[in-house]
Amino acid sequence: MGIVHIPIHTMSDTHEPSMETIISLAKRRGFVFPGSEIYGGLAGTYDYGPLGVALKNNLRNLWWRIFVESRDDMYGVDAAILMNPKVWEASGHVTGFSDPLIECKKCKHRFRADQVKTKPKKDKEDNLVRDEEVWICEHCGSKNNMEEPQQFNMMFKTHAGASEDAMTVYLRPETAGGIFMNYKNIIDSVHPKFPFGIAQIGKAFRNEIAPRDFIFRLRELEQMEVEYFVRPDEWEQAFEQWRIMMHEYAQAIGIKDSTLHELEVLPKDRAHYSKRTIDFEFDYPFGRKELWGLAYRTDFDLSAHEKGSGVELKYLNEVTKEKFTPHVIEPSLGVDRTVLATLLSAYRQDEMGNEKRVYLAFPPIIAPIKAMVSPLLRNKPELVEKARSVYKDLKKVIPQIMWDDNGNIGKRYRRQDEIGTPFCITIDFDTLGEKPELKDTVTLRHRDTAQQERMSITNVISVVRDAIQGITSS
Ligand code: GAP
């Protein structure tokens, strides 16, 4: 049963969407909403709706599958967000996790000093004054009217306990802290062979001076992190291994190589714990900026926690009796920036039947909804009954499917295109046996090409299942 070609369809164009387009689609279709919106929102916070949750789950699960389950040397943890504050004293975050802050003397607005807009200074004759710049307040426009920059610590503080002198604790600024706290637990409980890594996915909190660009710079964010413990002389090869794995993940979630760029971070710009960092930068509509990071954290953290806690954190090889402080390679991926990069990468616009069509070309493995099932006509009970039974059978095997019998079939297809559903399955009179040779067959429509195939219900189930397992693509 061959493929039905749709002659009115022109091939997809990789239209680059603006941030406004993505933000509006994300809100309209239930991916991402501004946080506490009816109260005017809260800067740096966003809520994920039904499709956003499904997309995030798929991105996390695939990350876990690639970074943890595909290997024999990885162990998962889910550490508490609140930790003893000594953790952050030892790690250097209490003194060093800060951004330079600058305040406008006139309007008192505060900015990140490294992001304040400047203009070259000119004299009365309009000649450039060498090495001098004019600082302009983005809020009130006043010029060269700023306080001296000061360091602003970005950790959120709260209190643990009900007493007057309750302990000040921090909301973790990176999930890594919880991983280091469990290094000894993993050694003592699982007895891993060396080298090995610990992975964690979870929320982190940063009181960013200037949250911006939708879900790019948030105050409440989510990270997928690995701390991989190696012998000191093996860090370079491990660094390379994880670098390649990050590219594999990017490819699997539909981020094109041409939009992903490695930036070797200069020593002066690296975090206090890192001796080498590569930023994986992505071409966002607002410029080329960091998506993920890969750092060589040396033995900075384990040594600092050994000193801070007084508990030995060296690794002892029981066979050779060799003892050393492991060094650490850390691939760190923000979930929210990954969501943003996948939405931007998937966005497509083309023309069908002289009408503009928008679709999200998600790889099936991360698509929030894998397939939509629909009766050709909603007012024919026999079609609806058969479609319901196909839907029920498919849902047992593939839970992420949707029922839609609203409006005409063309409109249903467009709605699914816009949320990135790779397959639409339609039950028509041939399914019921109007043409006996086509009984129990359905049409399977492919999102990207809009081509339709006729096939048996059993075959549909295996085509959809294979596609979401990455065996074939739509
Ligand atoms: N443990 C290492 C670490 O936290 P980082 O470069 O500060 O390193 C890692 O953060 C990743 O977390 C970034 O590459 C980005 O994906 C994400 N991230 C960091 N700050 C963020 C923010 N304010 N909003 C959203 N994502 C953020």
Image: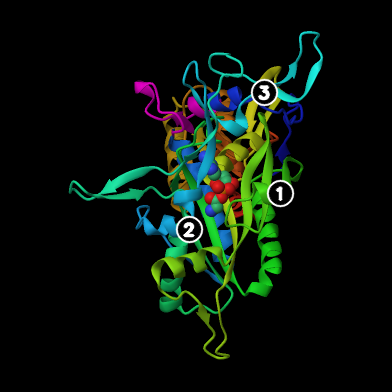
Residue 91 got which mark? Answer: 2
Q: What kind of residue is marked 2?
A: Ser
Residue 40 located within the stretch drawn in magenta: yes
Q: Earlier in the sequence, mark 2 or mark 1?
A: 2
Measured in 3D between alpha carbons, the distance from the residue under mark 3 to the one under mark 2, in whole angstroms, is 34 Å
- From the image, which quarter does the C terminus lie in? top right
- At horizontal 73% and vertical 40% (from top left) the residue drawn is 259
Q: What kind of residue is marked 3?
A: Thr
**Ligand 1 closer than 8 Å to the CB at disc 1?**
no
Q: What element does badge 2 sit on?
A: loop
Q: Position of residue 83 (x, y in %)?
A: 36, 56
Residue 266 got which mark? Answer: 1
Q: Earlier in the sequence, mark 1 or mark 3?
A: 3
Q: What element does badge 1 sit on?
A: loop
Q: Earlier in the sequence, mark 3 or mark 2?
A: 2
Q: What kind of residue is marked 1?
A: Leu
CA neighbours of label 3 inside 10 A, class few (<14), some (14 to 19), many (20+): some
Q: Position of residue 106 (x, y in %)?
A: 49, 16
- At horizontal 41% and vertical 74% (from top left) the residue drawn is 311
Residue under pointer 3: 118
Q: Quadrant of residue 351?
A: top right
- Whether residue 370 is visible here, answered yes or no, is no
- At horizontal 54% and vertical 14% (from top left) the residue drawn is 140
- At horizontal 37% and vertical 28% (from top left) the residue drawn is 36
Residue 220 located within the stretch drawn in magenta: no
The image shows residue 27, relative to residue 198, as above or below, that is above
Horizontal relation, residue 150 to residue 79: left or right:
right
Find the magenta span and give its range. 25-45
The image shows residue 185, relative to residue 430, as above or below, that is below
Foreground: 456 or 105? 105
